[in-house]
Amino acid sequence: MAEKADVIVIGAGIGGLTAAALLQERGVSTIVLEKNSFPGGSCSSFRKGGYTFDAGASVFYGFNDDDRGTLNLHSRIFRKLGIPVTTIPDPVQIHYHMPAGFNVPVHYDRNRFLECLYRRFPHEREGIRRFYDELESVYDILNSLPAGSLEDPLHIAAVGASNLLKAVALGYKTLFSMGGTARRFIHDQELLRFIDLESYSWAVQDAISTPLVNAGICLADRHHGGINYPVGGSGVIPDALVKGIEKFGGSVRFRCEVEQVVIENGVAVGVRLKGGEELRARAVVSNATVWDTFNRLVADSRLKVPEDRFIKAPSWFQIYLGVDGSVIPEGFDMHHIIVDDWSKYDQYGGTIYFSAPTVLDPALAPAGKHALHVFVTAETWQWEKYDRQGDDYRRAKEEYARSIIARCEKILPGLQDAVELMVTATPQTHERYLNRWDGSYGPLLKPGQNVLRKPQNRTPVRNLFAAGDSTFPGQGVIAVTYSGVSCASYIARQLGKPLDYL
């Protein structure tokens, strides 16, 4: 007989794990099925040669213990689960290194950050203040509204009844983009390029293509809740969610790859694993991308999602380095972004993302060493000509990695000679481990599309739901956490066990 549960979650990414943990805590039985032997997807850690590396994500919002508002979702979720996660405050979100000596550390202290911009652009002082105040106003609205499903009429009614003016104001602000808003107040082209890069750093799109609402979360909360790094690395977050699921009686099954969502009479009733085993449920949640869900897991050809329905974000070429600790100077920031040429910042490999988590958590590396993570955008087609088992593939990866490391000497002179361990990963690695089409960072809205056009948690198949970066609000750990909260909220209401607001 098929195993049964109230809810089956496909994939142990942060969105799916969050939904499962909140549902299980509420008494809704859940089973999470994960292809890999570890949870978290791109928000995970791995060990090599005595080093602990973040597989992907390392900039984390949502861990401030302040009880104001609802944006500190991680703190609230783990408090609800009774699972402690210790974090270290990061005083600088990202240190930007741009052409012509334009360097900006984005301090937790908002005034210090703005002063950096005022010094470079004294003629834009008023415009800078007004633009970042606009982001602050979006944040203030979002921070006053409880997290819940935008598809739940009772939630919408409750929010409207208690925060009508703010809800209306937020709806109005969904009509605008970050870049369009910036250009209302700012005219200096170099400064507008920086604002584009601020957007690109997390959305992989320029500011014109990025909804103002999303920017209000990422570019304002960094000065409120701030950026906090989990002690032990990014894998601590999914591990804690798994503990929460198991604490309340749920299960997470690793090395269980879902082959198909079982649909009967238009209703999702379970899943079929590779090997033929079937599990039944009252609801199924897919943490896969919208393309993987409907072009691979759902057999109905009428529901296939065209590639061009959304912009497909690129994948990544990643480099994990163990280095001699002497190369890292005192006071070095954890996160950096390097752009050598403004005309190439949004091209493959044009922007370098760089993190040094051991400046905050030295235990991630052997004594006297540092763990570094360096990555750039890339696509699977760039590596298709190589046999992944062949020497040419290995040599090509090493050669490309060395060229990127050489560019990083802009901020760390002597880095090339300090490397003692190097691990590389191409987009094919992402595709293989994360079960994501082309290893993509996910679907992005097209320029001018309202953020509410992003898919929500419901899908065209009854009782099949979605969580993760294919759903509102989009990419980033805190965003997929929100999607998990909203998905759990909707399903719990449907099953007659509504969640309390976090």
Image (tube, rainbow, N blue to C red):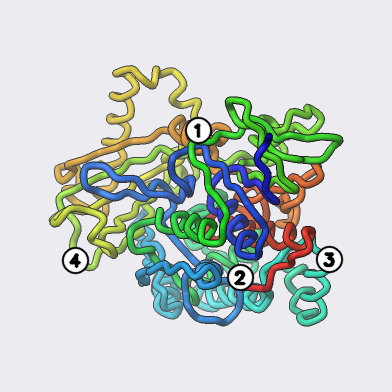
Q: Amino acid at mark 4?
A: Glu
CA separation in Å, label 4 and label 1: 37 Å
CA distance for labels 4 and 3: 53 Å
- Locate residue 212 relative to residue 126 in the image: left or right: right
Residue 495 image point, x, y percent: 77, 59
- Inter-mark Cα distance, 3 to 1: 37 Å
As helix, strand or loop, the secondary structure at mark 2 comes to helix
Q: Identify residue for label 3.
A: 153
Specify which label sits upstream in the sequence, 2 or 4: 2
Sequence-first disc among 3 and 1: 3
Residue on which disc 1 sits: 431
The amino acid type, in three-letter code, at marker 2 is: Phe
Image quarter in which the C terminus is found: bottom right
Discs 3, 2 touching: Cβ within 8 Å: no
Q: Nearer the viewer, mark 4 or mark 1?
A: 1
What's the distance in space between the residues labelled 1 and 2, CA to CA?
Answer: 41 Å
Residue 42 or 121: which is nearer the viewer? 42
> Residue at (73%, 61%) from the top-left corner?
492
Q: Which residue is mark 2?
A: 185
Image quadrant of residue 278? top right
Q: Assess whether mark 1 and mark 3 are in contact (beta carbons under 8 angstroms).
A: no
